[in-house]
Image (cartoon, rainbow, N blue to C red):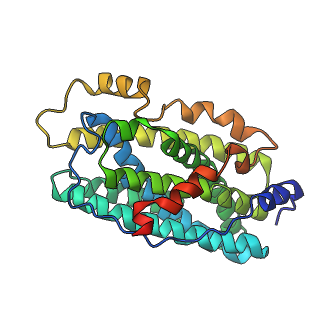
Amino acid sequence: MADNSATARSYQEEAHAIHARDVHFDFSSVPMHYIPGEVLATHVTNVMHLVLPEGERAMAACLAEALPHIDDERLREEVTGFIGQESMHASSHEGAREHLQSIGLDVESYVAGVAWLVDRLLGDQGLSGRAKEQWLKERLGLFAGMEHFTAVIGEWLLESKVLAELGMDPTMLDLVRWHGAEEVEHRSVVFDAYMHVDGGYLRRARTGLLASGTLLPLFIISTAYLYRKDPSRDKGRSWARQFVSATVRGVIPSFTTFVTEMPRYLRPGFHPSQLGSMDNALRYLAHSPAARA
């Protein structure tokens, strides 16, 4: 176990009870292009809530494996709450995936392929002894890096006004904002678990760079697949022009985020509590239609 008092102080300063919320989403009336007039942007958003949850399942399993190595009661409480939230994310997004599949977007085979790949690459591998311990630390480092980006994107979803202005379907808007808000809410948990179990800077830096290098191509490949599988006859102008236009207008987060965020994450004194205020996230979670339902 790493002894990192600076990280412990940062964690305690942002003490907050993480817990899974019982939410309900009704996807029955959600259209294929739930961001009106934005085909490519819709599929970029689809990646966030159809593909990434497969990684969240693996992350929750990794945190559950790490629990016996965590003897700090507060951190154990947060990790347990984190696991519950990620499980709720997966089940909620599964409903959206089933609905989109039912109206013609073939996502099942691709998501199953991603799930298979995630299990093979980020599962426990059946190791034992020191190899098992080192692989656990490696995965915690990778997931801490990935959570940095999901927290940044979650903050973007909460602060962006463009999606609502474009008339994004209310159910889907609530889904991605609820998910984004919880990503902001539990942004420190995996990082703190890594620092508690290992805490090495070199591993944190290396796995952070690897996380960035993994998520970016995953977003690009997944978006391209969903766009190609979209059964609509009229998908608008070329996907490249749609991508540039959506990025410039702030309809989707800039893909350069996976590069520009790395200097901040790689600072030796970095802690996720430095990402910004949690007020927006907690305020949204208090008023989310799905959570209140």
Residue situated in front as seen by the camera: 92 or 67: 92
User: Is residue 124 in sight in this rendering?
Assistant: no
Q: Where is residue 88 in the image (x, y as percent from the top left)?
A: 45, 69
Left or right, 55 with respect to 138, comes to left
Front residue of this view, candidates 274 and 94: 274
Seen at 30% across and 53% down, the residue is 110
Q: Image check: 72 left or right of 265?
A: right
In the rendered view, tell whether residue 233 sits above or below residue 187.
Answer: above
> Image height check: is 231 above or below 58?
above
Residue 83: % across, % down = 56, 70
Quadrant in the rendering for residue 126: bottom right
Q: Which of 16 and 132 is in front in this view?
A: 16
- Image quadrant in which you'd find residue 4: bottom right
Q: Residue at x 80, y 62 (%)?
A: 12
85 sits left or right of 245 in the view? right
- Residue 66 sits above or below residue 266 on the image: below
**Residue 54 visible within the image:** yes
Q: Which residue is drawn at 42% across and 52% down?
A: 176
- Residue at left offset 65%, top offset 47%: 207
Quarter of the image with the C terminus in it? bottom left
User: Quarter holding the N terminus?
Assistant: bottom right
